[in-house]
Image (tube, rainbow, N blue to C red):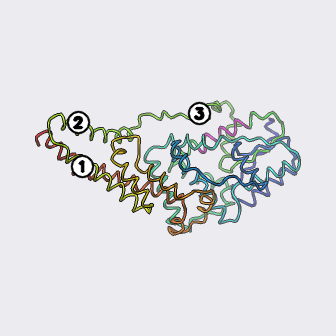
Amino acid sequence: MKRECLTIIGTAHVSSESVDEVKDAIYQQNPDVVAIELDAGRYTRLKKEMMGIEEDNTISVTQIIKDNKVGLFFTTTLLGYFQSKIGADVDVKPGSEMVGAIEACEDLNIPIALIDREINTTLQRALNKMGFIEKSKFLFGLLTSIFGFDDEEDEIDIEDLKNPDNLDDLMEMFKDEAPSVYEVLVRERDAYLAGRILQLPQDHVIAVVGAGHKPGIIKYLDNPETLPPLHELEKIDNDGGIPWVKIILALIPITFVVIFFLAYINGINITGNIYDFVIISMIMGFVGSILSGSKIQSAIVGGVVAPLTIIHPLLAAGWFSGLTEAKFRKVRKRDIQSLAHMESFKDLWHNNIFRILLVVIGTNLGVSIATLVILPSQVFIPLFMKLFGG
């Protein structure tokens, strides 16, 4: 790739003007190759949509939970929701500028280079780097956006997002609110996109990327010695330091078991305490599930497994009630697509993705209240006092 023959087009992913800009540049320049900000998976999906090929629209929530990809799935859904929402507001489908680039390349028989990192790798790296506070802020941002608590008067015109001054302000805000996510979604991908562009063997290149990445890509291209190895940016490292929150949560059930064991070997009658533990756990699992709008079958499952999941730190009652709920509420791609048009809680209540997620959260919340509040005060503290003569 010759640097002087490179054209980088920064686009807004839901902008009709970006579509025209991309197609006009390709037709006018007729480059050797067009590099687009897509990975192989997203490119394949776009191509199938362009050809009118419909894929099986059933999403296996069961498999998502079994593969421990719940967080990844809902992060992907969240990002899709925001982009689809903006696209619906301006009547432009997300990714339209990429479709325009593909159509122009096919018309002129120009090869396409896919230069983006695989989306699941990017999202998993982001989730791995996020701490508890960042994840909480992320969830809060989702809720405020869904329920319309954000101030519509502060909305910015889509085309204004390509203005460098506005981009700087937006990126700075993103960096302050979620530094770990900013590092992965912006800086890492700036480096990855720049590195892939430098690897292109063709001389005359047009690169179509999101406007937010253009300044970072140019910086790396001007200083290629600062680029990290691309294979390092493709790693998914699950070793994020000492997981203190998980350790603390694991210690709670271990403490419960230790107290029961010590009481037993010291000859204290714990039969009543065990009954209280099981009954309180089951009731709170059931109540949490049913209050979240689950089917009665899901609530029963959540209640039955609650005592076991409290003792086992790697299990959650909400998984089981959610899996049961998924048997009754089949999730389809239209449920994801319809998220863009949700304007009220009533709309969300009829969305199967939201309902299943609500059951998972509701059941876990009920069991958490039992674990952190009711059981210690009603079962374990009294037993502890008996054990140590208080």
Disc 3 secondary structure class: loop
Reading the image, the residue beneath label 3 is: 235
Q: First in sequence, mark 3 or 1: give its number.
A: 3
Judge the density around disc 3: few (<14), some (14-19), many (≥20) Cα neighbours within 10 Å.
Answer: few
Please say whether residue 190 is one of the residues in the magenta stretch. yes
Q: Which residues are magenta?
A: 185-196
Q: Give the number of the disc on residue 261.
A: 2
Q: Nearer the viewer, residue 372 or 21?
A: 372
Q: Nearer the viewer, mark 2 or mark 1?
A: 1
Q: CA distance from mark 2 to mark 3?
A: 43 Å
Q: What amino acid is at disc 1?
A: Tyr
Q: Which secondary structure is most common in the magenta stretch?
A: helix
Disc 1 secondary structure class: helix
Q: CA distance from mark 3 to mark 1?
A: 48 Å
Does residue 343 lie above or below 141 as drawn? below
Percent position of residue 48, x then y: 75, 51
Percent position of residue 69, x then y: 53, 44
Res 226 quadrant in image: top right
Q: CA distance from mark 2 to mark 1?
A: 15 Å
Reading the image, the residue beneath label 1 is: 275
Q: First in sequence, mark 2 or 1: give its number.
A: 2
Q: Nearer the viewer, mark 2 or mark 3?
A: 2
Percent position of residue 58, x then y: 62, 54
